[in-house]
Image: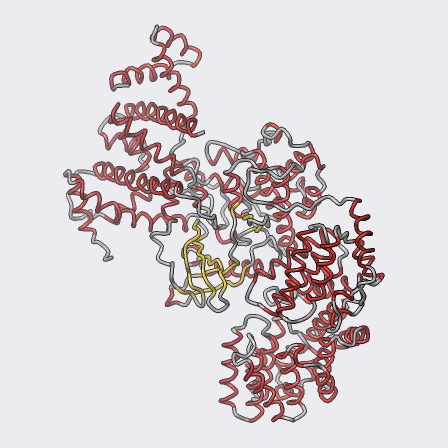
């Protein structure tokens, strides 16, 4: 597969931003490939005990993918809004697929893996989180956005406020309530599973 | 619920949150009135808020990590590195990717670990890593993952560094732990095996540094394998973990890497120097977790975990595991002592404690787990009477101090000597069938034919299946596996591992099993292990002290003596062996070899002619060719070499005969041909395996060609790789050609000193 140019990717992003849902379908694998490459490098480069930082990862992935020079982006916030949505989409799709695979029979464990162990259960959690976020969107869209920006783009409260163009205290309140709610919803799910 | 209701709940939640918790109830009472559902909603959210802090951030990062590791995007599958072909990705993590691969040369499955490029860009780091990994690869213990090779791909292949190790099918402790807490007996047996691995590594001066459930695999048969010895060093940086950069990173995403911090010793968390007692701490954490289902030091963030492990005492195990005894609690507590001086000072000490835990906790095998862990059964006095009965049944059947190599002897005619009776009584045969299988198996085990060996293995396996406590049968089975590995199917590493397992079982049941010590000596003395002469000598001597009639131990002991130039010791041993058993053909052959090394070529030839070629065609053939060559009977030597190569066109796996051809060509004055043969011998041997005799012949060829530098390099290689045979080097006429070279003189001085050191220990 030829490596798509940053221009192609930028065009797709713009198209998607303008309401072309099909653009995301094309965009996701491209972003995922880049993310994958970067994440691997991060994991290798970080010394033991360090954390794969979502923020840095997303930042770098998009900086590499997007033709910043030639596109008029509304602002940095706009970019992060898109980034968070794409990240959510990619990660949740991946997690769902993994959950399906896992249900499809237990292959003999022949693993020297650390990552597989680390992420165990987190796939299921992420899928549950996505479901809960969708429910939250119906109750309060902004609260759901706050969560999306914080979790999937790794934004700080201040950055989130900037992207959503609301006050910091509003973000704080949204965040506090949304997090409590998600925690409760996910805990319920766990109880049910047990 | 609808958005309006949600808004109402939100407002109450925020207001309540700003109140002191004591005032919240009254506030909710007043505002919710009769709407008890509203009140429940707000209260449950407030409660969730208390616990939610940072709970999801780690989950997202965890999925990113897994995505990064997934197979779909890795391009390495199906590629070749040297003679390894990757088949599939079986794991990935911070330490690189692990592939299932095939060793196309030996046709076996191996695990190929590709190190992350980021680790290997720093040359100093790579050097340190290689040093450590080499040391780790010399560790030979059934509970340590065997490393076959540490390699570096060619620049064309990207120059990646990789490690080839045995391929283990099984589950990590991490995945086992997911199935719930482990049975106490099972967990302590696993811990004993991990401690066994640590003990051997620590003795060799290697600290694991990263003992955690992910690094412990349990095979379906219960054998534990500890992975990644020495690898942790690769990721170490001199700066302590608690520096500002690290702690900033730590606070951002709680959850993800806690697994790694959680098993660290306090000294590691502080970034201090680490010694073997750090591994003991980590093993304590692992054992605690297996039993309690939670870790001894927990916290919401990584910093909290570190704080806990530096300062807090772990909650009593019995809080989570009612049936844990005080003794078990104490053992774990001692592993987890903050000050390393207060922990077990050696893994061996810990093993003893684990083994002597009161039986109260040795609960029955859990029925929930699929993994069976073999546990030594307690010895019962009952066996003694059964043993006596069994002996009565077979007395009159068995003879033979020297039955080992009597081809005419039939198993039915074998009866035990008094010595053997004593030994077998000690080894408690429990039922006549097991004992019968043992005797028959033992008969076949010592005949050096593949079909006999297979029969022996079948019978001995059946014997230990009938009576798992039958030490002598385990020992003979170990010996049969040893032959299988060394004589018949050298590429199949599993036989070596099985042999180790059986040795362990035999010695656990009967530490005075002569055959087990003999097998262990042979297992230790391998190229991968750098031929530890002194260790092997110790095992063989132990075996012979326990049973002086053990002809095979005599043969092997003489072999080791010959490698370090202790010819007089070797001859004495061999002569005893032949006197005790005139049909010990291998001993007969070795006498010839020793005489050759001593420069007594005529006598050597006479002795060699007495030993049937079938004993071991390459050994007899090559030794005889060398004796003839020294006697100036070139054409006869050539004939032997050619005859051998006609039967075995690929030469031995180490190119031994090709190296003799090189020497002959050098003696003929045909330098180009000699160089060709040297190249081809190297190609065959690849510097791997029992290569030092080939290396020695190459050195001789170069010496004859008066290429001193090459000759000395090869001589050094032979000496460094298990053949420091100073008296041979000093007296070999072929090496005389370079005898005046100062580098040769210096090397000889060094080897002489080493040789004297060896002799002092004999």
Which of the 4 image quarters holds residue B617? bottom right
* Image-based side of B386 in relation to B83, left or right: right
- In this view of the protein, which residue sits in the foreground, B2 or B331? B2
User: Would you say B235 lies left or right of A180 here?
Assistant: right
Foreground: B728 or B106?
B106
Q: Position of residue A13 (x, y in %)?
A: 19, 43
Write the residue at 66% across / 89% down: B628
Instruction: Report the number of discs.
Output: 0
Image-quadrant location for residue B456: bottom right
Q: As drawn, which residue projects farthest toward the right?
A: B418
Query: Which image quarter is the C terminus of chain B in?
Result: bottom right
> Is residue B739 at least partly visible in the picture?
no
Viewer-side residue, B167 vs B33: B167
Q: Residue at x 62, y 39 (%)?
A: B365
Q: Is residue B613 above or below residue B403?
A: below
Identify which residue is drawn at 26% across, 27% down.
Answer: A137
Position of residue B330 measured from the top left corner of the image (x, y, whole percent): 67, 35
Q: Is residue A136 above or below residue B504?
A: above
Residue B487 picture location, percent across and down: 62, 70
Provide residue B176's location: percent of width, then percent of height. Answer: 52, 42
Instruction: Locate residue B56: give its quadrant.
Output: top left
Q: Is residue B398 above or below residue B617?
A: above
């Amino acid at each position: 597969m030829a490596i798509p140019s940053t221009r192609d990717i930028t065009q797709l992003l713009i198209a998607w931003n303008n309401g072309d849902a099909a653009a995301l379908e094309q965009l996701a694998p491209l972003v995922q490939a880049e993310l994958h490459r970067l994440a691997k490098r991060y994991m290798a480069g970080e010394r033991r005990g360090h954390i794969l930082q979502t923020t840095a990862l997303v930042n770098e992935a998009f900086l590499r993918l997007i033709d910043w020079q030639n596109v008029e982006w509304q602002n940095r916030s706009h970019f992060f809004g898109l980034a968070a949505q794409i990240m959510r989409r990619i990660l949740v799709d991946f997690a769902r697929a993994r959950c399906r695979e896992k249900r499809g029979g237990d292959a003999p464990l022949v693993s020297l893996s650390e990552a597989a162990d680390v992420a165990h259960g987190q796939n299921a959690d992420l899928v549950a989180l996505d479901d809960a976020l969708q429910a939250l969107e119906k109750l309060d869209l902004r609260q759901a956005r706050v969560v999306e920006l914080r979790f999937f783009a790794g934004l700080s409260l201040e950055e989130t406020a900037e992207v959503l163009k609301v006050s910091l205290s509003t973000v704080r309140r949204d965040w506090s309530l949304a997090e409590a709610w998600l925690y409760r919803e996910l805990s319920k799910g766990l109880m049910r599973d047990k | 619920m609808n958005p309006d209701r949600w808004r109402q709940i939100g407002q109450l939640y925020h207001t309540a949150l700003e109140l002191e918790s004591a005032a919240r109830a009254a506030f909710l009472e007043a505002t919710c009135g009769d709407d008890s559902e509203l009140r429940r909603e707000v209260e449950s959210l407030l409660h969730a808020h208390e616990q939610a802090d940072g709970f999801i951030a780690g989950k997202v990062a965890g999925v990113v990590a897994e995505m990064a590791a997934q197979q779909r995007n890795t391009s390495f599958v199906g590629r070749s590195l040297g003679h390894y072909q990757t088949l599939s990705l079986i794991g990935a993590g911070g330490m690189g990717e692990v592939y299932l691969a095939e060793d196309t040369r030996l046709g076996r499955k191996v695990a190929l670990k590709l190190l992350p490029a980021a680790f290997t860009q720093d040359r100093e780091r790579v050097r340190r890593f290689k040093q450590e990994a080499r040391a780790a690869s010399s560790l030979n213990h059934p509970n340590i993952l065997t490393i076959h090779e540490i390699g570096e791909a060619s620049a064309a292949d990207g120059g990646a560094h990789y490690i080839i190790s045995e391929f283990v099918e099984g589950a990590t402790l991490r995945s086992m732990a997911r199935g719930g807490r482990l049975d106490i007996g099972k967990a302590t047996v696993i811990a004993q095996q991990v401690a066994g691995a640590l003990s051997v590594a620590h003795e060799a001066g290697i600290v694991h540094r990263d003992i955690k459930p992910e690094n412990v695999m349990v095979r379906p048969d219960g054998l534990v394998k500890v992975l990644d010895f020495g690898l942790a060093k690769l990721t170490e940086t001199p700066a302590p973990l608690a520096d500002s950069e690290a702690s900033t990173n730590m606070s951002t995403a709680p959850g993800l890497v806690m697994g790694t911090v959680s098993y660290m010793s306090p000294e590691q968390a502080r970034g201090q120097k680490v010694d073997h007692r750090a591994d003991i701490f980590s093993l304590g954490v692992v054992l605690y977790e297996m039993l309690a289902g939670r870790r001894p030091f927990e916290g919401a963030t990584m910093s909290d975990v570190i704080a806990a492990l530096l300062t807090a005492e772990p909650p009593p195990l019995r809080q989570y595991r009612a049936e844990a005894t005080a003794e078990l609690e104490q053992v774990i507590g001692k592993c987890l002592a903050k000050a390393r001086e207060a922990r077990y000072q050696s893994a061996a000490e810990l093993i003893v404690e684990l083994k002597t835990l009161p039986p109260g906790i040795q609960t029955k095998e859990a029925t929930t787990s699929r993994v069976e862990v073999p546990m030594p059964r307690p010895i019962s006095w009952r066996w003694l009477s059964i043993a006596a009965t069994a002996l009565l049944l077979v007395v009159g059947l068995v003879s033979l101090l020297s039955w080992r190599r009597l081809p005419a002897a039939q198993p039915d005619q074998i009866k035990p000597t008094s010595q053997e009776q004593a030994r077998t009584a000690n080894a408690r045969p429990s039922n006549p069938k097991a004992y019968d299988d043992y005797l028959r198996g033992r008969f076949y085990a010592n005949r050096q034919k593949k079909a006999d060996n297979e029969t022996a293995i079948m019978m001995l396996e059946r014997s230990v299946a009938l009576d798992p406590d039958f030490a002598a049968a385990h020992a003979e089975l170990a010996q049969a596996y040893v032959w299988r590995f060394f004589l018949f199917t050298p590429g199949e590493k599993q036989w070596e591992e099985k042999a180790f397992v059986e040795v362990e079982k035999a010695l656990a049941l009967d530490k005075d099993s002569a055959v087990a010590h003999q097998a262990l000596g042979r297992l230790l003395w391998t190229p991968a292990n750098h031929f530890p002469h002194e260790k092997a000598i110790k095992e063989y001597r132990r075996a012979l002290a326990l049973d002086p009639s053990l002809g095979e131990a005599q043969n092997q002991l003489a072999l080791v003596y010959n490698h370090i130039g202790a010819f007089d010791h070797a001859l004495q041993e061999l002569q005893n062996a032949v006197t005790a058993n005139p049909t010990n053909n291998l001993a007969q052959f070795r006498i010839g070899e020793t005489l050759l090394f001593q420069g007594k070529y005529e006598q050597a030839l006479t002795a060699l002619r007495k030993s049937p070629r079938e004993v071991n065609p390459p050994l007899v053939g090559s030794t005889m060719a060398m004796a003839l060559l020294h006697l100036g009977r070139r054409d006869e030597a050539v004939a032997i070499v050619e005859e051998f190569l006609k039967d075995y066109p690929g030469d031995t796996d180490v190119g031994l005969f090709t190296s003799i051809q090189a020497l002959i060509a050098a003696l003929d004055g045909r330098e180009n041909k000699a160089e060709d043969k040297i190249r081809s011998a190297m190609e065959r041997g690849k510097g791997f395996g029992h290569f030092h005799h080939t290396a020695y012949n190459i050195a001789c060829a170069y010496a004859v060609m008066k290429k001193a530098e090459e000759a000395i390099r090869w001589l050094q290689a032979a000496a460094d790789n298990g053949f420091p045979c100073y008296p041979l080097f000093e007296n070999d006429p072929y090496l005389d050609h370079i005898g005046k070279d100062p580098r040769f003189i210096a090397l000889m001085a060094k080897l002489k000193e080493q040789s004297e050191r060896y002799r002092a220990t004999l």
